[in-house]
Image (tube, rainbow, N blue to C red):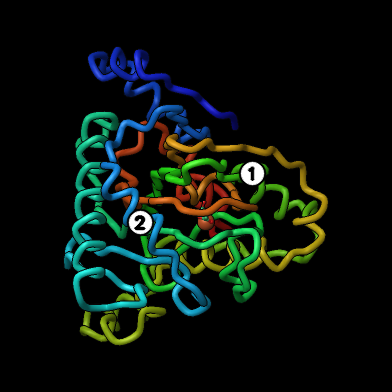
């Protein structure tokens, strides 16, 4: 994996050249980070001033402030009501729709075959947070959502560092395809997560879901794919020898920049930094230009059933 830097003039050229955009999709899917030194998203100085002035304390329960675009709702903010909450909701609504509008163009080859997931505001200093191990973001991991199964669709995240003066600092190691192979060959220590025998949901779960019970328990709705991705996320975070010994790349995202990455593919951790905005898209696995690279593609080849 590598970082692909896209300066403003290159971006403008690419937006007029569908084959360039397809190349960028391919790079993302191969596990590269696309980096925009100058963010393509405009954030007004008013909005910025408001966001930087609303650092909340004690976010152990809510990891971040989330904005749910479909419901036009904020969660995790101290003041749930009142003018500050209203203002924040307006800023997040605008951010979310601006990012999605940009990605509709930039990721043109996907033809918007995605679900717009949550946006978030991350106002806390990452270096000194006190989160439960499985929620920690300073440990390398690939993303999986405990309550929102994707069934093989992809987790794509777009970030803005809105800190006025400090970089947001990440590390990455091997991509999912490499890690899962290393684990399977016993090269990662810490045991292993059993590979799914098949990515098809088991018939009992299908039957229950067909009978309408799927709504009751999120775990029943989790497919074998989601089950594996969740367990793999936990396995990586809990594997201290892997965390210590794996080869690492360091990245510093400067103030005013944006970057995007398939976080289910690229193992990542944030070591330090404060004040970021983020928008998640769940991109249909059928939209991939390199489906064989995706975690779903990799796991279906490795599935143990014959
Ligand atoms: C993460 O997705 O693990 C954290 C990324 C960040 O907040 O920079
Ligand atoms: Fe993550």
Q: Which residue: 42% across, 45% down?
A: 162
Q: Is the residue at mark 1 in contact range of ligand 1, meaning its CB lies under 8 Å from it?
A: no
Where in the figure is residue 95, as x and y percent of width and height? 26, 48
Front residue of 87 and 155: 87
151 shown above or below 158: below
Q: Give the left or right position of residue 215, taking residue 9 as reference.
A: left
The residue at the point 38 percent across, 51 percent down is 278
Q: Quickly name the residue at label 2.
A: 51
In the depicted structure, whether residue 142 falls above or below residue 222: above
Residue marked by disc 1: 172
| Residue at image point 49% right, 51% down | 264
Quarter of the image containing the C terminus?
Answer: bottom right
| Residue closest to the eye, 247 or 211 | 247
Compare marks 1 and 2 and give the one earlier in the sequence: 2
Q: Secondary structure at mark 1?
A: strand
Find residue 213 and report its image quarter: bottom left
Question: Looking at the picture, does residue 275 appear above or below residue 113?
Answer: below
Percent position of residue 250, x then y: 67, 39
Toward the viewer: 221 or 243? Answer: 243
């Amino acid at each position: 994996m590598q970082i692909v830097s896209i300066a403003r003039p290159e971006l403008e050229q690419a937006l007029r050249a569908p084959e360039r955009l397809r190349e960028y999709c391919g790079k993302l899917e191969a596990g590269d980070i696309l980096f925009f030194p100058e963010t393509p998203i405009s954030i007004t100085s008013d909005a910025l001033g408001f966001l930087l002035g609303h650092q909340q304390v004690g976010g152990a329960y809510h990891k971040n402030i989330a904005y749910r675009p479909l419901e036009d709702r904020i969660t995790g903010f101290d003041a749930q009501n009142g003018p500050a909450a209203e203002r924040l909701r307006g800023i997040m609504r605008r951010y979310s729709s601006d990012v999605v509008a940009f990605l509709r163009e930039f990721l043109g080859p996907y033809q918007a075959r995605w679900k717009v997931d949550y946006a978030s505001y991350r106002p806390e200093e990452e270096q000194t947070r006190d989160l439960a191990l499985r929620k920690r973001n300073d440990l390398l991991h690939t993303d999986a959502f405990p309550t929102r199964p994707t069934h093989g669709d992809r987790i794509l995240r777009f970030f803005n560092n809105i800190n006025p003066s400090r970089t947001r600092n990440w590390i990455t190691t091997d991509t999912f395809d490499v890690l899962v192979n290393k684990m399977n060959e016993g090269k990662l220590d810490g045991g292993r997560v059993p590979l799914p025998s098949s990515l098809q949901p088991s018939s009992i779960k299908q039957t229950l879901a067909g009978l309408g019970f799927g709504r009751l328990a999120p775990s029943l709705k989790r497919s074998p794919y989601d089950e594996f991705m969740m367990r793999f996320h936990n396995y990586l975070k809990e594997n201290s020898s892997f965390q210590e010994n794996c080869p690492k790349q360091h990245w510093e995202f400067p103030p005013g920049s944006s970057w995007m990455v398939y976080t289910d593919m690229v193992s990542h951790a944030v070591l330090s930094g404060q004040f970021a905005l983020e928008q998640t898209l769940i991109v249909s696995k059928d939209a991939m230009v390199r489906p064989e690279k995706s975690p779903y593609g990799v796991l279906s080849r490795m599935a143990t059933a014959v």
